[in-house]
Image (cartoon, rainbow, N blue to C red):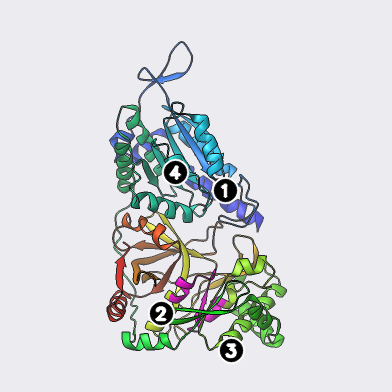
C-alpha cells in the first residue's frame, strides 16, 4: 500500500505543477487584472529586491497541520508526507510571484499561531496565506484576528472538513479580511495570491478579498450540460412515511451507556453500549461469516491487502449488528466506530457491515452521527428503500465539483432490488487498518444530498450530477465527484452551522422532500 500511495502522490504532484510558467499563470488568472500585473524587479545597492522603488511585500504562508509526516490516523492518511507538497507550493509561489517575499511557517494550533503572530509583529508581514493541510487544526482563526489580508486555502483531501467549516464561519460572521481558494489546481492559488498586489498599491483589505472572489469565480468552469440517465423514484406519501418512521428505531452506540433518548424526526432513539455490539459480534455464527466472506470474494472487483481473518471479523460484525437490530426492534444503527475500535470496545470495523445493511434497505451509519443516521433512515423510508451515502464532502472549484468521500458506501444505490455497481474491499483509509469499501458509484445520474436538523426543524438540500469516481489514495476510499446544480459559491456557506456530513441519494428527491417538510411543518433550506 505504501508504494502505491507514494506513486499516486507523485503523479498528483506532477499534475498540479505541470507547465507552471509565468506565461500560463498570467493566462490562468487574466480574469482579475489587478492580481496579474507583474511589476519589474530592481535592486537598491545590490541588496533587498524592490518593486517600483518599494521593498517587496512580505507574505507569510502558514501550513496548518499535525506534523510534516503524519503520525496519526486522519485525512489524508497515516504516514502521509506533506513535505513534497509544501516544497512545490513554496517553489511555485516564489517562481511565479517574484515580486513578493514568501516566508513559510508551520503551526499545529492556536498556540503556535500566536507565536507566529507575535514574532511577525505589526509591521514585518503584509499578508498571510493559511493552508489547511489537516482538517481540524485551528490556526486560521488566530491569524485572521490580526486584521491583515488573509488568503485561506484548502489542501484537497487533507484539510477540507476544517476548511469548509471555518471558512463558512468567516462568511457568516462578516470576517472581512479573509479571501479563500478551494481548488486542486495550483494556478488558482497563484491567481488568488497575486491579489496581494492590491494591498501593495494602497488598496483596502476588502478590495483584496473581493479580488480573490473574482479570481475564483472567473477560474471556475461554466456549468456543464449533461444528458442524464432515467432515474425514477416511487416515493410513498408523507403521511405513510411519518407513520413508518414512528414505527422505526435508531440504535446509537456511543459509549457504554444504555438509555432511551428523545425521538429525532419522530424516530425513536435508543443508546446501547459497545458491549452489546461486541457480544453479538463474538457470538456470530462462524460458518455463516465464512459464507459471507466467500460471497465478497466472488463479487468484489478485488480485495486489496486484506487478510481473511479481517474479512471474517468484518462479516461477524455485520451478523452481530443484524442480531442487535432484531433484538431491539430497530432498523438503523450508528456506531462510534473509531472510538470503539481504538478503545478496544469493539474488535472489528463495521464498514463492511454498514455496506451490507444499507444495501438491504436498513441503515448503518458512521461515527455515531445520529442526525445523519436519521437523514438516511427518513429518506430511505420515503423512497421505498434507496440507501443514502453518508460522506465528508470536498469542494474543488477547478473542476466545479463537490466530492462526496467516505469509507462506507452501498453498491445498490437504487434500492435492494436495483442494479449493483462494482466495488473494492480495501483498508480503512485514514489508518490503513480493518476493511472498508470503495464503491464505484453510477455516473450521469441526478443525485439529491440532504441533512436534517431536528432542533431547528430544517432540512438542508442540494442536488448534483454524478460525473466521476476519484481513486486518489488520499482521504476516504469512495469518492463520488458531482457537479452541483445551482450556485457553487453558495455551497460554501452552510458548513459551520450544519457540520461536515451530508447524505446523498440517487434520484430527484426535491419534490418528495418538500412534501414531507410541508406535512410535518419543517423548513427546507436550499444549500446551492
| Residue in view at x 49 percent, y 34 percent | 117
Left or right of residue 78, residue 478 in this image: left
C-alpha span from label 1 to label 4: 15 Å
Of the two numbered discs 1 and 4 on the same chain, state the one appearing first in sequence.
1
Q: Depth check: give the residue in front, 326 or 307.
A: 326
Q: Which residue position is annotated with label 1? A: 10
C-alpha span from label 1 to label 3: 50 Å
Residue 341 against residue 13 in the figure, above or below: below
Q: Which residue position is annotated with label 4? A: 186
Of the two numbered discs 1 and 2 on the same chain, state the one appearing first in sequence.
1
Q: Are marks 1 and 2 in contact (CB under 8 Å)?
A: no
Mark nearest the camera among 1 and 2 is 2
Q: Mark number for residue 378?
A: 2
Q: Which residues are magenta?
A: 354-374
Of the two numbered discs 2 and 4 on the same chain, state the one appearing first in sequence.
4
Of the two numbered discs 3 and 4 on the same chain, state the one appearing first in sequence.
4
Q: Is residue 356 magenta?
A: yes
Residue 199: x percent and y percent? 34, 31
Q: Are marks 1 and 3 in contact (CB under 8 Å)?
A: no
Residue 4 against residue 89 in the figure, above or below: below
C-alpha span from label 3 to label 4: 53 Å
Residue 424: x percent and y percent? 57, 70
Tag 3, which secondary structure?
helix
Amino acid at each position: 500500500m505504501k508504494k502505491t500511495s507514494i506513486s499516486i502522490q507523485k503523479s498528483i504532484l506532477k499534475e498540479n505543477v505541470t507547465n507552471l510558467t509565468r506565461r500560463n499563470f498570467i493566462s490562468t488568472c487574466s480574469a482579475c487584472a489587478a492580481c496579474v500585473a507583474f511589476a519589474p524587479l530592481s535592486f537598491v545597492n545590490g541588496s533587498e529586491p524592490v518593486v517600483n522603488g518599494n521593498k517587496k511585500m512580505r507574505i507569510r504562508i502558514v501550513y496548518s497541520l499535525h506534523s510534516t509526516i503524519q503520525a496519526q490516523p486522519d485525512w489524508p492518511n497515516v504516514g502521509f508526507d506533506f513535505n513534497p507538497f509544501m516544497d512545490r507550493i513554496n517553489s511555485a509561489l516564489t517562481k511565479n510571484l517574484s515580486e513578493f517575499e514568501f516566508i513559510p511557517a508551520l503551526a499545529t494550533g492556536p498556540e503556535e499561531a500566536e507565536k507566529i503572530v507575535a514574532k511577525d509583529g505589526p509591521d514585518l508581514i503584509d499578508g498571510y496565506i493559511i493552508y489547511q493541510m489537516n482538517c481540524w487544526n485551528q490556526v486560521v482563526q488566530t491569524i485572521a484576528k490580526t486584521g491583515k489580508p488573509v488568503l485561506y486555502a484548502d489542501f484537497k483531501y487533507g484539510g477540507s472538513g476544517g476548511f469548509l467549516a471555518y471558512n463558512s464561519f468567516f462568511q457568516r460572521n462578516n470576517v472581512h479580511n479573509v479571501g479563500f481558494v478551494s481548488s486542486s489546481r495550483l494556478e488558482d492559488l497563484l491567481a488568488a495570491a497575486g491579489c496581494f498586489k492590491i494591498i501593495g498599491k494602497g488598496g483596502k483589505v476588502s478590495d483584496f478579498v473581493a479580488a480573490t472572489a473574482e479570481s475564483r469565480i472567473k477560474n471556475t468552469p461554466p456549468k456543464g450540460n449533461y444528458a442524464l440517465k432515467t432515474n425514477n423514484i416511487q416515493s410513498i406519501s408523507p403521511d405513510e412515511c411519518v407513520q413508518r418512521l414512528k414505527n422505526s428505531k435508531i440504535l446509537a452506540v456511543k459509549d457504554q451507556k444504555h438509555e432511551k433518548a428523545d425521538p429525532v424526526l419522530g424516530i425513536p432513539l435508543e443508546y446501547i453500549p459497545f458491549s452489546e455490539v461486541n457480544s453479538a459480534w463474538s457470538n456470530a455464527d462462524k460458518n455463516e461469516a465464512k459464507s459471507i466472506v466467500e460471497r465478497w470474494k466472488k463479487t468484489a472487483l478485488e480485495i486489496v491487502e486484506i487478510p481473511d481473518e479481517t474479512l471474517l471479523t468484518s462479516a461477524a460484525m455485520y451478523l452481530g449488528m443484524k442480531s442487535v437490530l432484531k433484538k431491539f426492534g430497530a432498523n438503523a444503527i450508528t456506531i462510534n466506530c473509531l472510538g470503539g475500535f481504538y478503545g478496544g470496545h469493539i474488535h472489528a470495523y463495521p464498514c463492511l457491515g454498514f455496506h451490507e445493511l444499507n444495501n438491504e434497505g436498513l441503515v448503518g451509519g458512521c461515527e455515531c452521527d445520529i442526525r445523519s443516521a436519521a437523514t438516511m433512515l427518513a429518506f430511505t423510508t420515503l423512497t421505498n428503500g434507496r440507501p443514502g451515502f453518508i460522506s465528508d464532502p470536498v469542494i474543488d472549484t477547478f473542476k466545479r465539483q463537490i466530492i462526496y468521500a467516505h469509507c462506507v458506501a452501498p453498491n445498490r444505490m437504487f434500492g435492494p432490488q436495483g442494479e449493483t455497481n462494482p466495488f473494492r474491499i480495501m483498508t480503512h483509509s485514514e489508518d490503513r487498518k480493518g476493511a472498508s469499501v470503495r464503491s464505484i458509484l453510477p455516473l450521469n445520474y441526478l443525485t439529491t444530498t440532504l441533512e436534517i436538523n431536528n432542533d431547528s426543524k430544517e432540512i438542508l438540500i442540494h442536488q448534483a450530477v454524478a460525473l466521476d469516481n476519484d481513486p486518489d489514495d488520499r482521504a476516504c476510499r469512495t469518492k463520488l465527484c458531482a457537479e452541483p446544480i445551482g450556485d457553487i459559491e453558495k455551497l460554501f456557506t452552510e458548513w459551520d452551522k450544519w457540520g461536515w456530513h451530508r447524505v446523498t441519494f440517487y434520484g430527484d428527491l426535491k419534490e418528495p422532500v418538500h412534501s414531507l417538510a410541508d406535512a410535518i411543518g419543517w423548513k427546507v433550506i436550499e444549500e446551492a
